[in-house]
Amino acid sequence: MATLGPSEIRAMTQACTKAKGLNMAQGVCDTPVPMPVIEGAKRAMDRGINTYTRFDGLAELRQALADKLARYNGLRANPETDITVSAGATGAFHCACAALLNPGDEVILFEPYYQYHATALLSVEAVPVSVQMHAPDWTFTLADVERVVTERTRAIVVNSPGNPSGKVFSRAELEGIAAIATRHDLFVFTDDIYEYFLYDGRSHISMATLPDMAERTITIGGYSKTFSITGWRIGYSVAVERWAHLIGAMNDLLYVCAPAPLQMGVAAGITELPESFYRQMAQDFQRKRDRFCAALTGAGLTPSIPQGAYYVLADVLTLPGRTGKERAMYLLDKIGVAGVPGEAFFSGSEGSHFLRFSYAKTDADLDEACRRFGKLR
């Protein structure tokens, strides 16, 4: 535990607050919350839904999730046995790691990786093993994956669309990963929290829908990002009953249950919002991506254009400093914009070349960020 501490993401948020800067470090997603979500939570509070729920979530939310999984993901999940509502997607991931991994188990991550995935693995004494992806499109080869598999390998983590890269894994890539997982009898943990943030006509493919993958895939998702409720902490995992039972027991131990009225708010959002809401959201965020990446390019900080999610990794080697943290602090001091040092997402020195920015901001804040980057020209 001595090696674990607050993430660099939160550290830069604190530094930004102290400097009274514009926080593009943490994906707080300060865009408006859809009204059906707010009203659903309010109704639940008024009706007295304020006490413990079942350890795996309220029936209304589990059913809403099962319907959504069938409709959008092509997954058949029994809401009574296969779905566990947890304290955010991060909580769901941690429960899966604690329930299904033993100390010393190796777990493959695609680098750049989400820092919390790596630290959650370390917290249960598993061993993260990286497969390097290469900018600007964050490509890798299946041979790279096969090369790191050992007799201690237990799982592969797939985050698509990805944080921090914005990578959307192609069907061919997912099928290749599935073949490796099947051949070596591995779990695949998929973090699908950004599944609706897709650009340039891309589609989300759920790993569990591929042949022979339902039994070994732990699908993790949530609505923190989609509904702009990052502080509500409502996520979920989906697995066959054998694994869901273990994950649910760990969820009960760690969290007891997710916040009851907020579960009802999310259920209302899932059932009441039309499909056009998700299409419009993706279009809006694609416009944000394009505006912000153009500002980065104009400032000489070349972005790797994200295919999904709402983060961008920008090459910042032109900024003063020897490390990503020094370059991040220079940028915060110079123009008052906070980004996350790339070392938070890389195991090697390549991380110092990048800063991660979140463009999940209001249009007014995004306009101000673009204006500030214009000062670097």
Image (cartoon, grey):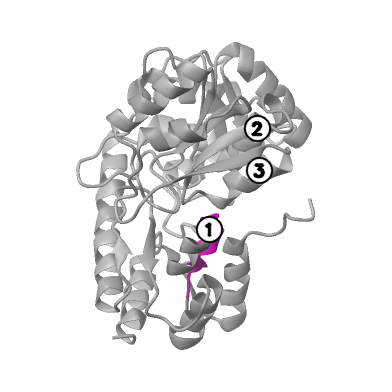
Proximity of marks 3 and 2: CB atoms separated by less than 8 Å = yes
> Between disc 1 and disc 3, whose residue precedes?
3
Identify the residue position indicated by label 1 in the image.
348
Q: Nearer the viewer, residue 133 or 100?
A: 133
Q: Amino acid at mark 1?
A: Gly
In magenta stretch: residue 341: yes
Q: Position of residue 272 (x, y in %)?
A: 39, 33
* Residue that mark 3 sits on: 120
Residue 97: mark = 2
- Kind of residue at disc 3: Ala
Whole-Å distance between the Cαs marked 1 and 2?
Answer: 24 Å
Question: Quarter-wise, where is residue 36 in the image?
Answer: top left
Q: Nearer the viewer, mark 1 or mark 2?
A: 1
Q: Of label 3 and label 2, which has the lower sequence position?
A: 2
How far from the left and from the top, in percent, is residue 18? 62, 80
Q: Quadrant of residue 135?
A: bottom left
Q: CA distance from mark 3 to mark 2?
A: 7 Å
Residue 91: which quarter of the image?
top right
Query: What residue type is disc 2 on?
Result: Cys
Q: Which residue: 67% across, 16% down?
A: 245
Q: Is residue 246 left or right of residue 73?
A: right
Residue 44 visible, this angle: no
Figure check: 158 above or below 282: above
Mark earlier in primary sequence (1, 2) = 2
Q: Which residues are magenta?
A: 338-348
The secondary element bearing badge 1 is classed as loop
Question: Of the numbered discs in the image, which one, if any, rests on residue 259?
Answer: none
Quadrant location of the C terminus in the rendered image: bottom left
Looking at the image, residue 169 sits to the left or right of residue 16; the answer is left
Residue under the point 30% across and 79% down: 299
Tell which of 343 and 14 is nearer to you. 343
Q: Is residue 364 visible?
A: yes
